Image (tube, rainbow, N blue to C red):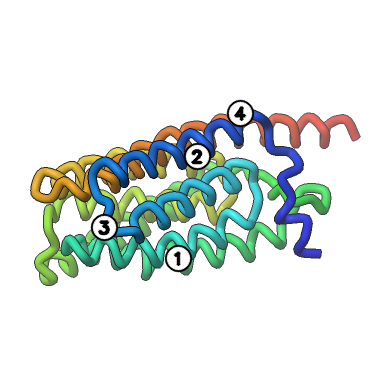
Amino acid sequence: MLGKFFTLKGFSKSDFFLWGGSAALILAAFLAFDRKNFLSPISSVIGVTSLIFIAKGNPLGQALTVIFSVFYGIISFSFSYYGEMITYLGMTAPMAGAAMVNWLKNPYKNSAQVRVNRLRLQELWVMLPLAAVVTAVFFFLLRALGTANLLPSTISVTTSFIAVYLLFRRSPFYALAYAANDIVLIVLWAMAAAEDISYFSVLICFAVFLANDIYGFVSWLKMQKKQREELLEK
């Protein structure tokens, strides 16, 4: 039964090109700027692989996100980015696990693809207050921990929460929230790279993630349109 989630059926040449180009760029950045912290390219390749599967609505992408979150949490700890560490280990990883269960319960026509959900406007009145509470709690927690670059770290928590919430709810707009998060993280790791050039490879990782999340948004809009049209034909 689980075999259907490991298939590459439905992946296009564009998917393979994007994944291959992303992985190559990540490895090139590692060889150019690091060559020591092998956890960085390994986690980045796992991360970009998860994004490709998520872009296709495959629950396997969520399982890979859990693995990436653990590795990225360790990398974040190494530069005192405690906000990133806590966010990914304490929020992104468990919510990705919950999202995987939710996606498995909501397949589209018993396939490896999740059924895309259309959120009601009223749900924003649930998501936004929750995001505000999470942001406030993390701000004071991260300040107490002496987190480096506190403001962008806090903004990263906000965008991450909105992204994982929308991902759990099977909304295409998860990708835009993650794209916003990628931009924040590019700024964060640019600051880190200014102090230690080896972290430039992590910056490249999130630049690659940004391209993949934009691609994911377009992919989910196509999925949503196709699913809606097929349902209307019945």
Q: Is residue 74 visible?
A: yes
> Residue 93, which numbered label?
1
In the image, is residue 9 above or below residue 74? above
Q: Is residue 165 left or right of residue 30?
A: right
Compute the Cα span from label 2 to label 3: 36 Å
Q: CA distance from mark 4 to mark 2?
A: 21 Å
Q: CA distance from mark 3 to mark 1?
A: 26 Å
Is any part of residue 139 visible from this angle?
no
- Left or right of 120? Residue 77 is left
Residue 36 is marked as 3
Q: Is residue 226 above or below residue 36?
A: above
Whether residues under marks 3 and 4 lie with C-beta atoms below 8 angstroms apart, the answer is no
Amino acid type assigned to the residue bearing label 1 in the image:
Ala
Which mark is first along the chain, 1 or 4? 4
| Point 20% across, 49% down: residue | 198
Crowd band around label 2 with a 10 angstrom C-alpha radius: few (<14), some (14–19), many (20+): many
Going from N to C along the chain, the mark reached first, 2 or 3, is 3
Residue visible at 37% across and 70% down?
90
In the image, 221 versus 137, the foreground residue is 221
Q: Considering only order in the chain, which callout, 4 or 3, is on the residue closer to the N terminus?
A: 4
Q: Kindly state the secondary structure of the residue where label 4 is placed.
A: helix
Q: Residues within 10 Å of mark 4 (few under 14, many from 20)?
A: few
Residue located beneath label 4 in the image? 14
Q: Mark 2 sits on what residue? A: 173
Of the numbered discs in the image, which one, if any, rests on residue 109? none
Q: Are marks 4 and 2 in contact (CB under 8 Å)?
A: no
Q: Nearer the viewer, residue 121 or 145?
A: 145
Disc 4/disc 1 C-alpha distance (Å): 28 Å
Residue at screen point 25% across, 61% down:
76
